[in-house]
Amino acid sequence: MSRQDVKTRSGERIAIVSGLRTPFARQSTEFGKVPAVDLGKMVVSELLSRTDIDPALVEQVVYGQVVQMPAAPNIAREIVLGTGMNIGTDAYSVTRACATSFQASVNVAESIMAGAIDIGIAGGADSSSVLPIGVSKKLAAGLLALSKAKTLSKKIKIARSLSLKDLAPVPPAVAEYSTGLSMGQTAEQMAKSYGITRQEQDELAHRSHSLASKAWQEGKIRDEVMTAFPEPYKQWIDQDNNIRHDSSIESYAKLRPAFDRKFGTVTAANSTPLTDGAGAILLMREGRAKELGLDVLGYIRSYAFSAIQVEYDLLMGPSFATPMALDRAGIELADLDLIEMHEAFAAQTLANVKMFASDKFAQQKLGRSKAIGEIDMDKFNVLGSSIAYGHPFAATGARMMVQTLRELKRRGGGLALNTACAAGGLGAAMILEVE
């Protein structure tokens, strides 16, 4: 595979100048009444304020939302209109499930590479609390028929055809449309297929919470998380509220399996919770950052996306996307200084870690002669990951990128991998560089 040149035609790199996120909050807690579009507006507005950049200079906003709200189908444009940016700022929305922020960032980067823009904002927001509650198919058809009925008798007939069951609200689906399987069921399948034990899953969850708690206590996360004042504006939130600061491995063993009650190993404690939050990243041409006197967090060295079957191993995306990103960067796994793999479930994470080191997997699934490489756990998810921080679907990639770049900078620079699985059998991987 040929090297990827993430640069403009004049040879300038794509700089990530700054990034910010809201605190991540569990479903129905501090952000319980705040829709995703307002979370997005709040974080982009604060990002612009902290960066001290004229909003009129931002030429494009690419933003994502996984749980779509019919009232605001283009969240990116609503953010432009609600944050004081130039009314002529280009804005469109994307979704790649849990890899949405990576896709948004790549889209902005590619616009810069093409010379279409110099400065753009990427990111994502999701609310698992303010949801688009729908109606049954029969009720929807009945309401449409009622609107077209000309006589009272026809309207009465249509109304009588509906049962009480038809009137029940329908929450957003949690299963894959194509298979009917939930993510949790797929995580259970992967745990069984790859021999991931309950003890191993609980240990990874405990590790994630412990490292995230330590990162907060040491002040490493503070500057990348804003203080939010959600409605009804009586209190604020300035930290993620899912992290178990008193995590003990014994407490995880007490929970029952969530998806396979009899033989399962996936629990609420070794999975990510439903979460509300938003994140945003400011990208620009390297030379433009210098012209504006802005410090650079880091650069995008390479990126790759993958797609696999959905009937089984749906969450194996990192094992497919990562080798492509490494090849495009011209490096190997051992050259990395840090790795963060999104923890949708401990089972999924550990299955991918195992397959990274498998020659058989590489030969049979990737068409490669040898394994991607064995992950050095001293480099892996060193500040914890999604099991601890939470997972607002479209915002997680932004969290990962900013958190990783700042940690690389603290360590004196180097190379890092961010990788994530996503619904639909999708995967994402990005190599980041800090000088």
Image: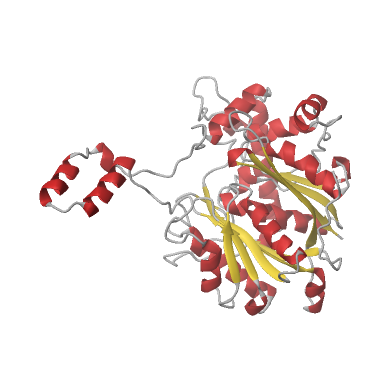
Q: Quadrant of residue 114?
A: bottom right
Q: Does residue 206 lie above or below 405 as drawn?
A: above
Quarter in which the N terminus is drawn: top right
Place of residue 387 in the rendered image (x, y in percent of width and height, measured from the top left):
62, 42
Residue 390 seen in render:
yes
Residue at horizontal 58%, vertical 63%?
92
Residue at horizontal 71%, vertical 39%?
318
173 lies left or right of 151: right
Residue placed most toward the observer, 266 or 286 = 286
Quarter in which the C terminus is drawn: bottom right
Residue 266 seen in render:
no
Residue at horizontal 81%, vertical 41%?
378
Place of residue 11 in the rendered image (x, y in percent of width and height, measured from the top left):
86, 65
354 lies left or right of 157: right
Residue at horizontal 11%, vertical 47%?
153
Q: Does residue 399 lie above or below 273 as drawn?
A: below
Residue placed most toward the observer, 409 or 298 = 298
Place of residue 356 in the rendered image (x, y in percent of width and height, measured from the top left):
78, 33
Q: Quadrant of residue 168?
A: top left
Place of residue 78 in the rendered image (x, y in percent of width and height, measured from the top left):
51, 67
Q: Does residue 270 lie above or below 75 as drawn?
A: above
Residue found at the very far left of the displayed protein: 153
